[in-house]
Image (spheres, rainbow, N blue to C red):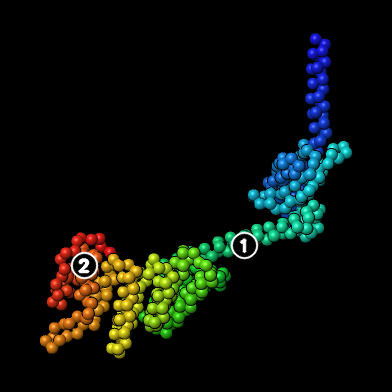
Amino acid sequence: MKTKLRTALSALLVIVLTIFVAAQNLARVEGKCTDDAGKPIAGATVELLNTDTGQKTNLKTDKSGGFLSVGVTTGSYKISLIQNGQVLFFFNNVTIHLLPENAPNVIDFNLAKEHAGQGTGHMTAEQQKQMGEARKRNADAAKERAEIGSLNKMLTDAAAAEQAGNWDQAVTILTQAAQTAPNRDLLWARLGGAELGAGDATKTTSKEQSDQHYQKSATDYQKAVQLLSANPNPTPDQKKQRAGQHSKLRQPYDKTRQPQQGTAEYNLAAQMDPPSAAMYYFSLRPTLTNSATREQDQQIKTKDIEEANAAFDKAIAAKPDYSEAYYQKAINLLSKATFDKTGKMVPAEGTVDAFNKYLEVDPQGKHAEEAKSIIASLGEKVQTTYKKGKSK
């Protein structure tokens, strides 16, 4: 019985001594956190990471920026000040000691002194460099967020002005936006669109002023294309985006009667975005045909019509079932018809074939009846073997 009692007392003594020893290894840590302006940093987290054991202790700062713990295991620590998930500062290789009469280990985060290089110097030169780089990244990110917020506000205001027909106001807003962030292609493209709208709005009152807007529109779209072209290895989406800007650049060229430049932009768009090539080539038709109707010289007119038809052929080659391209090519060819001695119309070569091809591809299309009527009026036969198809 006495043996058992001695054993129990011995075990109890070991437990008591263990607790006593552990208590002797628990140190007091306290400190205060102030920002660059010397104001308390309240509600932040002070993380104590024991680099020997990996154990973490998190302390919250009070309204005066202070923190305190009376149960920190002695050892080597990395101590970080964290706010909103962001490390504001940290000390590395900090040794927590047991001090006489339970005096505290004081760890103050005085960010004004630390950032000025006058702090307690717990970081190595490399760590200080890394912290400085992190602060710069954080500052740059904050600046970027602020700029994006401001630009989004401008874009929203410009869209509202355009919706209300206030094109000059939209141009003013977007000019400011493009000057604020001149390396953003989207802003130049939006400004080009606003200048285009302003040109249309003044077209009936001042041709000179209208043309000035169109010229500015072309310059703005060129800037957007230039920025997009700076990437030597664009992704498919970036290529498509650049093609879209080339397509938009065609518009001010059309407005200022520069069909060759407009044609060049559409060709570039088709080359940049092959999946949409048919659409771009097809869209050449208004540029070229409209140009032809503006010219009085028959030789130039014929040349432009042939170029328009060549664009239709490219569209068809890119998309063989492009029914609208066949139809528009046939209509375009009608302008090349001649008349014999009896006054009968003689269609240009390929006219009837183009109409029939349209009917073959899209027999129930929106132009089907008109195509049949024109074929009949030319004294040709409409093929009747076509099956019902989906309108293109």
Check disc 1: other Cα within 10 Å, few if <14, some if 14-19, many if 20+.
few
Q: Residue at x 81, y 24 (%)?
A: 14
Per the rendering, the mark at residue 359 is 2
Instruction: Please tell me which residue lies in front, 85 or 318.
Output: 318
Residue type, label 2: Leu
User: Can you say whether 252 is above or below 364 in the image?
Assistant: below
Callout 1: SS:
helix
Is residue 105 at least partly visible in the picture?
A: yes
- Residue at numbered disc 1: 143
Check disc 2: other Cα within 10 Å, few if <14, some if 14-19, many if 20+.
many
Q: Position of residue 340 (x, y in %)?
A: 15, 86
Q: Residue at x 75, y 57 (%)?
A: 126
> The N terminus is located in which quarter?
top right
User: Can you say whether 176 is above or below 145 in the image?
Assistant: below
* Relative to 203, 69 lies left or right: right
* Relative to 366, 166 lies left or right: right
Q: Residue at x 78, y 58 (%)?
A: 125
Indicate which label's residue lies in the foreground, 1 or 2: 2
Callout 2: SS:
helix
Q: Position of residue 212 (x, y in %)?
A: 45, 82
Q: Position of residue 244 (x, y in %)?
A: 43, 69
Alpha carbon of mark 1 to alpha carbon of mark 2: how far?
A: 59 Å
> The C terminus is located in which quarter?
bottom left
Instruction: Please tell me which residue lies in front, 245 or 138.
Output: 245
Q: Residue at x 65, y 58 (%)?
A: 138
- Tell me the quarter of the picture where residue 307 sits: bottom left
Is residue 173 at least partly visible in the picture?
A: no
- Tell me the quarter of the picture where residue 114 sits: bottom right
Q: Position of residue 324 (x, y in %)?
A: 28, 69
Residue type, label 1: Lys
* Relative to 213, 358 lies left or right: left
